[in-house]
Image (cartoon, rainbow, N blue to C red):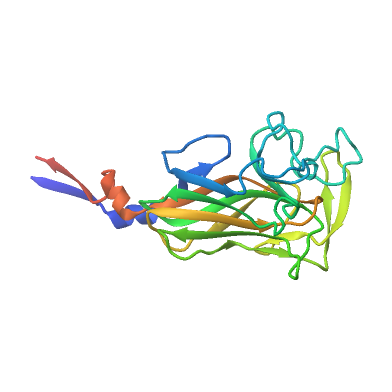
């Protein structure tokens, strides 16, 4: 009688595991595994009286009004000087412009999401971002667009930190193929953010049960726009997760007589 024993260890599976989507917040109501726990924002949608000011979820063809600086309408209005969201983007997204006004003199806005991250480690967050405008840097009237994270109620730590290049100029490509040169572009973690949505990625240190993602921002000008979409969290199943699913610590015993 001979025996052949194959043992699949938890550690071996964890080493071979690759990152997968934990959840995504796409502003279109799609839910992944019940892991999107909550969303809050300040001020609430519809707070600003002027159609040129905004901080909320928008969608072409659905929203009653969208601030002009967020939309690239050069196919219809060739003289349009600023815009991010092109005519072909018909899903929902979050936009922000000119938050300093009579309705909100300090212009400080925020949004906060809570996600269930239990049983995952090696987390990262991907966010599609677009921006266009002549922003103001540090000083008495700064523009900023900062993302931080907290796990299980701990202190918030930087995730994406904005920086305004006050000595720079960027050439933005519009939907109709024309370009616009604008001073003082926006960078995020050292990467230039222009008016074509691009996915920005940052790792999250640590793990736990609930991750809180927070956005804090301020912008003083109707020609300063920032938009984002598709907040995605990725991670690797923790070794304990593999065991729960019957994938770790599993021994296969085959006997041959």
Q: Quadrant of residue 93?
A: top right
Location of residue 71 in the rendering, given as x and y in whole percent from the top left corner: 77, 40
Q: Is residue 145 shown above or below 115? A: below
**Residue 19 left/right relative to 189:** left
Q: Residue furthest front?
A: 102
Location of residue 30 in the rendering, given as x and y in whole percent from the top left corner: 52, 34
Q: How many numbered marks appear?
A: 0
Q: Residue furthest right?
A: 79
Q: Quadrant of residue 75?
A: top right
Residue at image location 92% in from the left, 41% down from the top: 79
Residue at image location 74% in from the left, 55% down from the top: 100
Residue at image location 80% in from the left, 67% down from the top: 166
Location of residue 117 in the rendering, given as x and y in whole percent from the top left corner: 41, 51
From the image, which quarter does the N terminus lie in? Answer: top left
From the image, which quarter does the C terminus lie in? Answer: top left
The one of 54 and 245 positioned closer to us in this rendering? 54
**Residue 51 left/right relative to 158:** right
């Amino acid at each position: 009688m001979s025996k052949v024993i194959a043992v699949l260890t938890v550690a071996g599976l964890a080493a071979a595991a690759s990152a997968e989507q934990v959840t995504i917040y796409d502003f279109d109501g799609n839910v992944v595994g019940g892991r999107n726990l909550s969303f809050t924002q300040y001020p609430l949608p519809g707070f600003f009286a002027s159609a040129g000011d905004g901080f909320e979820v928008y969608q072409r063809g659905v929203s009653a009004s969208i601030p002009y600086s967020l939309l690239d309408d050069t196919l219809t209005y060739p003289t349009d000087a600023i815009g991010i969201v092109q005519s072909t983007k018909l899903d929902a997204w979050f936009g922000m412009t000119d938050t300093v006004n009579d309705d909100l003199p300090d212009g400080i806005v925020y949004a906060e999401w809570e996600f269930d991250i239990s049983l995952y480690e090696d987390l990262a967050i991907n966010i599609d971002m677009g921006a266009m405008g002549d922003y103001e840097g540090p000083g008495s009237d700064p523009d900023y667009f900062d993302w931080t994270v907290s796990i299980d109620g701990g202190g918030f730590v930087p995730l994406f930190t904005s920086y305004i290049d006050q000595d720079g100029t960027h050439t933005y490509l519009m939907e109709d193929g024309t370009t616009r040169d604008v001073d003082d572009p926006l960078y995020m973690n050292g990467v230039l953010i222009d008016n074509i949505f691009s996915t920005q990625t940052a790792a999250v240190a640590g793990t736990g049960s609930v991750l809180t993602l927070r956005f804090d921002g301020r912008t003083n000008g109707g020609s300063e726009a920032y938009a984002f979409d598709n907040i995605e969290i990725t991670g690797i199943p923790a070794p304990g997760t593999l065991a729960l699913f019957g994938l770790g610590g599993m021994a296969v015993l085959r006997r041959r007589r």
